[in-house]
Image (cartoon, grey):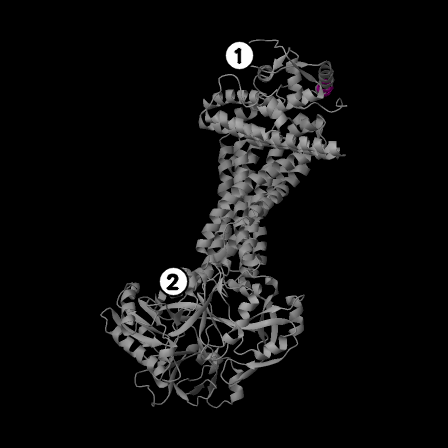
Amino acid sequence: MNIAGKPRHSPRTSAASRTLRRLMRAYPAFFRQRYSSEMVRILADERDHARYQGLWGSIRYWGDILIDILVGAARMRIRAARANAAKAGRRDRQRGETMDRLFQDLRYAVRTLTLRPGWTLAAVATLALGIGATTAIFSLVDHVLLRPLPYPEPERLVTLQAYSPRLGRTRGAVSYPVSTIIAQSQQVVDRLGLFGTGRNSVEIGAAAAELMLGGIVSWEVLDALAVPPMLGRGFQEEDDRPGAADKVLLSYGLWKERFAADPEVLGRSLRIGEKPHAIIGVMPPGFGFPQRDVRYWVPMSAQPRVESYHYLETLGRLRTGLSAAQADAQLRSLQLTVPSGAPGRTEEIGIRVATLLDWTVGEVRPQLLLFLGAVAVVLLIACLNVVSLMLSRSAQRARELALRSALGAGRGRLVRQILTEATLLGLSGGLLGSLLSVGISRTLLALAPIDLPRSESWTTDGVLPAFAVALSLAVGVLIGIWPALRSSRPNLSRGLQLGGRTSAGDTRQPRLRAALVVVQIGLALTLLVNAGLLLRTFEGLASADPGFSTASILAIRPALPMSRYSGEGLARQFFADLLERIRALPQVETAAATATVPFGGGQISETLMLEGETIEEAREKPSVDVQVVEPEFFRVLAVSPLRGRILSSTDREGAPGVVLVNETFVRQLLEGEEALGRRIRLGDHGRERWSEIVGVVPDIRPYRPNREILPMVFESADQDRDYWLFSGILIRTRTTAPEGLVPQMREIVRGLDAGVPLAGVTPLRQRFDRLLTHPRFRAWLLSAFGISALLLAVIGVYGVVSNDVVQRRREIGVRLALGARRSQILNWVGLRGARLAAFGLALGLLGSLASTRLLESYLFGVAAYDTATFALSSAVLLAAAMAAGYLPARHAGRIDPVDALRCE
Amino acid sequence: MNGRNPLPQAALNILLALLEGDAHGHGIKKAIEQRTGGRVRMRAGTLYEALHRLDTEGLIDEVDTPGDCREATSRWRYYRLTNEGRQRLAAEVNRLRDIVQYAASRDLLTDSDHS
């Protein structure tokens, strides 16, 4: 009987026939042997016909037979498997029938969907957009928020956060050392250590010094993380002691790039901060603690001046069996006395336990959840669109369903049928959507702020398609269940009688679709308003006036190695030499060194005492911002005094102490009284020098523009030469493109000291822009969602109104025949779109009012109920909805009454 | 046992085609297309699956000798309606007739486009 695979008549050797024969393998062997050669002959014959119908014919042909063969083969294989199982033992017959029906339903669904390709395409594209965007955002959320950290038993990794009873909130970081905390938390946390990061100049071999980010960790930290080095060993207790020989662990990246992945690297050394460190190990690829871009690790206690380290974080492993919440409960009652930020002083703190994951992503969580919520709304709108499409079609299919019902199909059967169709739509949308989501993910990744934690490991992996499939199934049920339940109750006689006629029949159905559109418009408006607020926030931030000119200013930050520059006046001398050379450049107008570079270069906060206050009173006040600058600072930034004078070069060491203050200082601390002549003292750690206020300058914001303006004091660096250190130089250039001077600046620094790396040579404007990456990302993303929502809602309006026109074609014809003017018809139909929009807008305004509150913490310069944004968003949506209603209305105006009545 | 369930569409069409006499798969397919004016085009997979099913249920039978030799160059399997198949077909057609009569009594049979 074996004639399979070798048809006797002139075997076609074309690729198509080969493919067809290969397809036959889908069938079970017994079936294939019997029928495949005949089937291939028939299919090849049809293929020849299909080829005459061009590309589209071919596509349809292959699509048809692929579904036909695969569905049939799967059904047969399942049936065969079941027969086998039945032989072995008793099998549930019911299930068999269910499978049969499922395949029948599937095939029927494919047929109905392909019958109206335009309709199907619209539905699938809509779902693809919704599912694609949702999947992309979910995958971002998954990577950042949900994935466990890449360490063994990551849920046991915790950080102990200092809780400040004075501030009434968790203040976070602690100061070195933490022996008290360790002693007190021992019963719940094992191997508690400290970690921080720092940039330092690194020299490898003869290469020029380079600034690199290093991890500074107690030996317990790497132990607690439980990731062994891939080469060599990790830190041990004796490496982590004051005075211990300097040792370093390399990151995989550093080892690969700078040591050519040399396995003999152990025992060699590199210079960090100009001190040789022996390489004792290399960490495995992918290990980056606490950040991905850390290039090396050094033991904390062996660092010089470790006593002055503040803002350190703790890490430890919970003892087995404890959860972070339990640990938190146990330690909550503790009151500890620990070193405070100021030398020699202590403070009282409480302890809060947070998991390392929470600590890593806690800040971005609300923002990501906002994105997820927004994209879910887009998906919901998309689903409503498809529900509406399905309802419109089920009206047209009423006759078919009635007929099937009459032929013996039960209600359950009809429900299943429609659900199968919906699921098929959902899955097709999901398939297309997951392709789309890969593109969306890539775009997101390119636009995401660089400091979004854990986003660097974001790749499109298996979770993404799995989520897309699960989501598609859910969407399928969501869009199918309602139409299924509604249309599975066909009124037999009416369904059959109404037949294909399109006179206004079921009045509930269009009303339902109208309600759906109203909800869509409402949701879309909500998203638009939220997006609008974020856009205005971003715009406000971007155009915020920092109070000084940023154009043509370049900021350079040399990183002086402490080992060579900690000596008396050495750093100061370096800056003086550097300034001299920079000022000598013809393109440079003037330059000034400062202790803090604007926009992200750190801030100095000090406690302040006004003359006449007691120490206790002074401590009660919040601290003030301090700017330690050279007098030229004010010329560089073009800041002129409102009253009094600015600092001058005669305000030097030995001269009477003088300071400038800003307007906020006068308003908040002096209650608007005359500032000139008042005396203040900065800091409460042993500085006894009083300074007189000699000038008041306008408020400037050398930090992110949404930060509250604090009272600010300007002090000349020349007056306190030993206390302050410069961190950078601001250069006012004579060009509008200061970045052109970057190579020259590098050259000058190298000329002074080749061992000094530059932490940055950046135009000030660029530093400012960098502060805006998060607001920009938020505004951009929400706008994208808002626009998608708008488009989908508009499509919804168009669908409902045009369906209306089709359904009322006869009515319109009668009206026209009775003498109605076309403009009246236009208005009549167009008004319907406007009415839908109006209801939707009302709903949307309510939704917006409720939702923008959630956004409040992200807003700047715009209120959560900003009237302009609400009005503009509503106007845009209304205009779009009217336009969408106008198109079918125009069509209705052109209906030929004779035609309309004849089509009955 | 199967008598109570409606015949699937494919099976019904095949049995109807075999009323004309023995035929092979391709012939059955062509006959159905001819009878329905091209409205029912059965796909090969559906056709052979139904044939296989009808064969195992004993409603049709494979015959060795071709009744019609137009395509003698190749070997096709020919099928013939069995008595059981004929009875089953009759039962199905009667069932459909009842439905049609009911529909007719409700003045439904005005156009011919039932699909």
The image quarter containing residue B41 is top right
10 Å crowding of disc 2: few (<14), some (14-19), many (20+): few
Q: What residue do we see at 51% from left, 20% from top? A: A45
Q: Position of residue A475 (x, y in %)?
A: 60, 44
> Does residue A597 appear left or right of residue A791 in this picture?
left
Helix, strand or loop for disc 2:
helix
Do badges 2 and 1 share one subunit?
no
On the image, which quarter does residue A409 sit in?
top right
- Magenta residues? B95-102
How far apart in space, not on screen, are marks 2 and 1 (Cα)? Answer: 75 Å
Q: Is residue A520 visible?
A: no
Q: Is residue A195 visible?
A: yes
Q: Chain of mark 1?
A: B
Q: Nearer the viewer, residue A658 or A256?
A: A256
Q: Is residue A280 above or below residue A628?
A: above
- Is B101 magenta? The answer is yes
Asked if the stretch drawn in magenta spans residue B67, the answer is: no
Residue B92: % across, % down = 72, 19
Read off the residue under disc 1. B73
Residue type at tag 1 = Thr
Q: Disc 2 residue type?
A: Arg
- Residue under numbered circle 2: A258
The crowd level at tag 1 (other Cα within 10 Å; few <14, some 14-19, many 20+) is few
User: Residue A851 location in percent, x, y?
Assistant: 57, 57
Assign the N terminus of chain A to one quadrant of the image. Answer: top right
Q: In the image shown, does A816 or A530 lie closer to the viewer?
A: A530
What SS does tag 1 mark? loop
Q: For this view, does B24 lie left or right of residue A450?
A: right
Q: Position of residue A360 (x, y in %)?
A: 54, 64
Mark 2, mark 1: which one is toward the viewer?
Answer: 2
What secondary structure is the magenta-colored segment mainly?
helix
Depth check, front residue: B108 or A374:
A374
